[in-house]
Amino acid sequence: MDWAEAVVAAALPRAVPTPRLRFAVEAAGWILLCFDVAPGALPHEPWRPHELTAALDMLAVCARELTPSPVRGMPTLGERMAGRCETWRGLERDGVWGPVTVSGVGAWERRHLDRLAAVEAVWDQVVVGDSLVHFDPRFDNILVDPATGTARIVDWGRACVGPAWTDRVCLLLQSDLGGLDPEPLLGSVAEPERVDAFLVALAGYWTHTAALPGPAHAPHLRERREHGRRATIGWLMRRWTPALA
């Protein structure tokens, strides 16, 4: 952890549904952030309908309150992911990208590799915006208060600037929807190709990281990455199928 999360947390408007930062100190090489206690518990997986509704409502409030970003000097979404979204181009150019090979990806990815690579090359120029986004709204960064039915989000360590809707995409991909179609839950986006570009970037990132060994301190991380890869590829396939019919 560095001071960036403390800077973001301290600058969040009070209307943002997140615990308030009380203080931050550094001692003996450690940074300690002290927040208010957030009532509630982690949502269930697969999502229960009322918990998912609470989480999506919470992100809608964040989108309203954090556009434009109240924090200056934050990296953009593209800068946050710099060097991490090169899988499709690497596979098209060399047939291999780190631990990933062309023969190791799915048949659909192989058939559309040229399109995936072309979109990946420009995704960071397309997926732009002026909202402060959390960029890690997994189920385990959300607390749902059973007394009020409202949700709060924690852990702003990956915050950056981009389109507000990207947090909804990340939420729908990083947690188990129990078979629900994410498309109706996303809502309308003015330019659908921007969603495609974001999905292409995330699919490449998770395809690469899911092929890496899981770290010893987080043995289930590889499973999470594989879940993200499958969910993202599946959503992208459904979005692209009508255009390719």
Image (cartoon, rainbow, N blue to C red):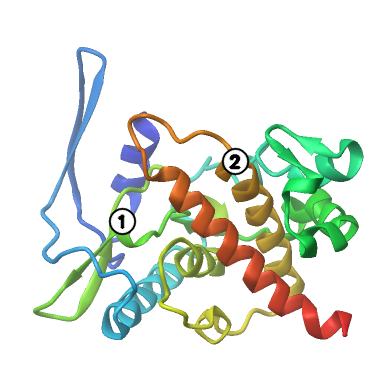
* Residue 148 makes an appearance in the image: yes
Residue at coordinates 58% horizontally, 82% vertically from top-left? Answer: 183
* Residue 191 makes an appearance in the image: no
In terms of depth relative to the viewer, which is nearer, 137 or 180? Answer: 180
| Amino acid found under the numbered disc labelled 2 | Ala
Residue at coordinates 34% horizontally, 82% vertically from top-left? Answer: 53
Give the x, y percent position of residue 169.
54, 68
In terms of depth relative to the viewer, which is nearer, 21 or 235? Answer: 235
User: Alpha-carbon neighbours of circle 1 within 10 Å: few (<14), some, or many (≥20)?
Assistant: some
Question: Residue 37 lies in what quarter of the image?
Answer: bottom left
Q: Which mark is residue 56?
A: none
Q: Which residue lies furthest to the top in this view?
A: 28
Looking at the image, residue 213 lies above or below residue 185: above
Give the side of residue 193 with respect to residue 207, left or right: right
**Where does label 1 land, which residue?**
141
Residue at coordinates 72% horizontally, 73% vertically from top-left? Answer: 237
Give the side of residue 180 with respect to residue 83, left or right: left
User: Alpha-carbon neighbours of circle 2 within 10 Å: few (<14), some, or many (≥20)?
Assistant: some
Name the element at disc 1.
helix
Question: Residue 190 lies in what quarter of the image?
Answer: bottom right
Give the x, y percent position of residue 35.
16, 46
In terms of depth relative to the viewer, which is nearer, 132 or 109? Answer: 109
Q: Which of marks 2 and 1 is in front?
A: 2
**Where does label 2 land, which residue?**
211
Residue at coordinates 52% horizontally, 42% vertically from top-left? Answer: 74
| Amino acid found under the numbered disc labelled 1 | Asn
Looking at the image, residue 196 lies above or below residue 187: above
Give the x, y percent position of residue 46.
34, 73
Give the x, y percent position of residue 145.
15, 72
Looking at the image, residue 165 lies above or below residue 91: below
